[in-house]
Amino acid sequence: MKVFDLHCDTITECCKKNVSLYDNDMHLSLKRMANYEEYTQVFAVWIRDEMRGDVARQYFDNVTDYFYKQIEENNKIVSVYGDEAETKVKAVLSVEGGSACGGTLEGLTHLYNRGVKLITLTWNSPNEIASGAFSEGGFTSFGKDFVKLSEEYGIVLDVSHLNRESFYDFIKISDKPFVASHSNADIVENPKGRKRNLTDEQIKLIKERNGIIGLNFCRNFLESDGLFGVDSFIRQLEHFLSLDCENNIALGSDYDGCSIHSDFVGAEKLLGVYNTLSERGYSKQLLDKMFYGNANRFFEENVKGL
Ligand SMILES: [Zn+2]
């Protein structure tokens, strides 16, 4: 079984706690990921909302140094996605919070040069680019330049964490395929989830642009009305299928970034989730697309330099 997961906070947590990516007690470890046929993981450097300017940029460099150090130390198991090495685990570097650029386009060039392939434009507060899910306002003029230059570099842009106004600004600024790396459909009664997740209209716009949406395992975005774990995930899956999104759904686990039901914790549980969904009648073709194929196709088509 192959896995392609669009979002986790594992490398940020590993760096903070100074623990190994190979073997740890977190949701993801290379040791457990290597049990799969192939496991491509987008690892986010999460820039907290209180970090801006040089502080954000320095923090990005610290975590990114740690990311490459872990890959170097474990190069029999993991390599950078797009490299020649034939390893079980492929790692994609992303940032969650475009403030990692320090608020300058030269800083964005720095992110590109360090190998960033995907940028989640904001976290929950406003930043130099746009306003996030728990704040008011849309894109700034710097944000427009940021989007244009990112697209020239072939960096994938990610609308997860944008508020509605920023999302609709983004649709006007960008004409490229894009992702929501870790967002669900706004069908669960949870005040925080409602702001973070996508309306049907947003989902249709992502689909029209040939984008993909990574389904999030976060309990707050899944659970309500007596549905938990895989059952609550199936409710999301059914909703996306009702919107004809078979070719647009992927995984966006949010591992090591939020509270997750035991059905999904951690990498080693994905095989069981796949098998449960198969037993419930979902086809191998559909499951292979959601667990791997759609995201892999999107990256092959949209990330330059692979
Ligand atoms: Zn997030």
Image (cartoon, grey):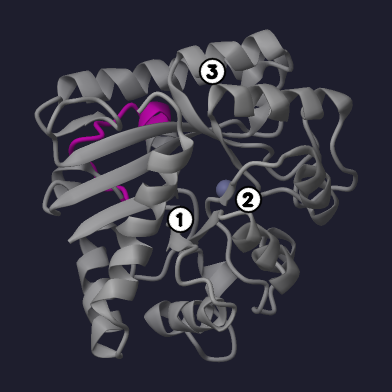
Residue 222, percent across and down?
54, 74
- Viewer-proximal residue among 177 and 107: 177
Residue 160 circle label: 2
Residue 252 circle label: 1
Q: Which amino acid does label 3 sit on?
A: Leu
Which residue corresponds to the image point at 30% horizontal and 90% vertical from the top-left? 280
Q: State left or right for residue 69 relative to residue 129.
A: left
Q: Does the magenta stretch include residue 18?
A: yes
Q: State left or right for residue 91 relative to residue 301.
A: left
Q: Residues within 10 Å of mark 1 (few under 14, many from 20)?
A: many
Q: Is residue 265 visible?
A: no
Q: In which quarter of the image is the C terminus?
A: top left
Q: Is residue 225 magenta?
A: no
Q: What residue type is labelled 1?
A: Gly
Segment colored magenta: 14-27
Q: In which quarter of the image is the N terminus?
A: bottom left
Q: Which of marks 1 and 3 is nearer the N terminus?
A: 3
CB-based contact (under 8 Å), mark 2 and mark 3 = no
Residue 56, percent across and down?
63, 19
Residue 111 circle label: 3
- Viewer-proximal residue among 110 and 17: 110
Disc 2 Cβ-to-ligand 1 distance below 8 Å:
yes
Dividing the picture into quadrants, the one containing residue 57 is top right
Which residue corresponds to the image point at 39% horizontal and 57% vertical from the top-left? 294
Residue 21 circle label: none
Q: In this view, does 288 lie above or below 5?
A: below
What is the secondary structure assignment of the residue under circle 3? helix
What is the secondary structure assignment of the residue under circle 2? loop
